[in-house]
Image (tube, coloured by chain):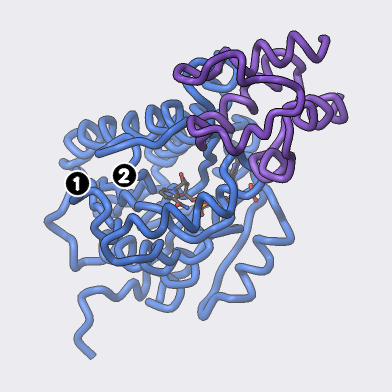
Amino acid sequence: MELNQFIALFAEQFEDTDTSVFTKDTLFQEIDEWSSLMALSVIGLADEEFGVRIKGDEISQVKTINGLFELIKSKK
Amino acid sequence: MYNPFSLEGKTILVTGASSGIGRAIAIECSKMGARVILTARNKERLEETLLMLDNEGELYVADLSNLDDRNTLLIHLSHIDGVVHSAGITDPVPFQFITKERLDTIFDINYFSPVFLTKELLKKKILRNNSSIVFVSSIAGLLCSSVGGSAYSATKSAINGMVKGIALDLANKQIRVNTVCPGMIDTGIFDNSGITQEQLVEDSKKYPLKRYGKPEEVAHSVVYLLSEASSWVTGTNLVIDGGYTLL
Ligand SMILES: NC(=O)c1ccc[n+]([C@@H]2O[C@H](COP(=O)([O-])OP(=O)(O)OC[C@H]3O[C@@H](n4cnc5c(N)ncnc54)[C@H](OP(=O)(O)O)[C@@H]3O)[C@@H](O)[C@H]2O)c1
């Protein structure tokens, strides 16, 4: 999967945040709508789309959406 | 000394005794005079629990979601006066990401294993008449849930429902069947999950008693349900949650 596709998938998890907010450098943990549910959804995405297991604590150590993408790819 | 909570002379099987709540239950039962039989998958951690007991104990390694392992465990058991089902897992996942495989895995250990282990203990007449069966369920399912907790809550409320019927069906043998339903307890159950330490600290502030519970605090209520002190109590779900579900 390409980074752009990942950003789009990531953005789909949000209901109230405008899609224009999401770029590879977005500090996702600072988005108002970011929550524990979002973190679990990212874990679900990683599992469903990439077949990898990531942990909540690993997500909280990553800053940008690109960082998240790299984290997931590193588990492949 | 007068003590209706004594477990003197009783043999109690505790599943999930290698960690957390199950370990605390094994230790407290032992302190109350019981002979305790420990089971879980991890041998080293079961041996650690065994060393913490005040009284006699035995351990059997078994993956309880595996029928062959359960059968091997049963071969080693003669008569018991109580069983405590504490083995269980969480698998926090938003409902949209649930799969049949994940549900199968969590239902296998949280629901099917304790249910069929109980059935097999009865069929082989290992559980004596007058004995007590305790399931470690949760407030999740019975009264509430958590974000990403739909699958877990389903396994636990399945237990809560089943217990009522089992209690009726075993009443003629004077076997009592109950659950304890803890709120969050400080154990390693959320290690390596989607939930962070930070979220757990924040969550603990929501409890009226201002902290998470301790494994011993669940163990003490299990001692009550195993002992003569609860001899007229069957089919109940005992909530132990620091007031969490009052709000
Ligand atoms: N902690 C809480 O906040 C909380 C709240 C409410 C209810 N509960 C319930 O309390 C019970 C114990 O939880 P805990 O917090 O003590 O968790 P824990 O520390 O993770 O202990 C879980 C236990 O289950 C055993 N286990 C897991 N899968 C098993 C399998 N396939 N076969 C045999 N044993 C297995 C583990 O042993 P091995 O890894 O050695 O097999 C371990 O001893 C669970 O049923 C949980 O749902 C916990």
- Residue at the disc numbered 1: B236
Outermost residue to the bottom: B1
User: What residue is shown at x 50% (from left), y 15% (from top)?
Assistant: B96
Looking at the image, residue B211 sits to the left or right of residue A41; the answer is: left
Q: Residues within 10 Å of mark 1 (few under 14, many from 20)?
A: some
Q: Amino acid at mark 1?
A: Thr
Name the residue nearer the viewer: A17 or A3.
A17
Looking at the image, residue B170 sits to the left or right of residue B197; the answer is: left
Number of numbered tags placed on the structure image: 2
Instruction: Decide which of tag 2 and tag 1 comes sooner along the chain.
Output: 2
Can residue B176 be seen in the rendering of this structure? no
- Residue B137 is situated, as x and y percent measured from the top left of the image, at 36, 44
Q: Quadrant of residue A16?
A: top left
Chain in purple?
A
Q: Nearer the viewer, mark 2 or mark 1?
A: 2
Q: Is mark 1 within 8 Å of ligand 1?
A: no
Q: Amino acid at mark 2?
A: Ile
Q: Are marks 2 and 1 on the same chain?
A: yes
User: What residue is shown at x 64% (from left), y 28% (from top)?
Assistant: A43
Looking at the image, residue B73 sits to the left or right of residue B94; the answer is: right
Q: Residues within 10 Å of mark 2 (few under 14, many from 20)?
A: many
Q: CA distance from mark 2 to mark 1?
A: 13 Å
Q: Secondary structure at mark 2?
A: helix
Disc 2: which chain? B
- Residue at the disc numbered 2: B139
Name the residue nearer the viewer: B114 or A45.
A45
Q: Is mark 2 within 8 Å of ligand 1?
A: yes
Q: Secondary structure at mark 1?
A: loop
Chain in blue?
B
- Residue B104 is situated, as x and y percent measured from the top left of the image, at 54, 21
Judge whether B186 appears above or below B128 on screen.
below
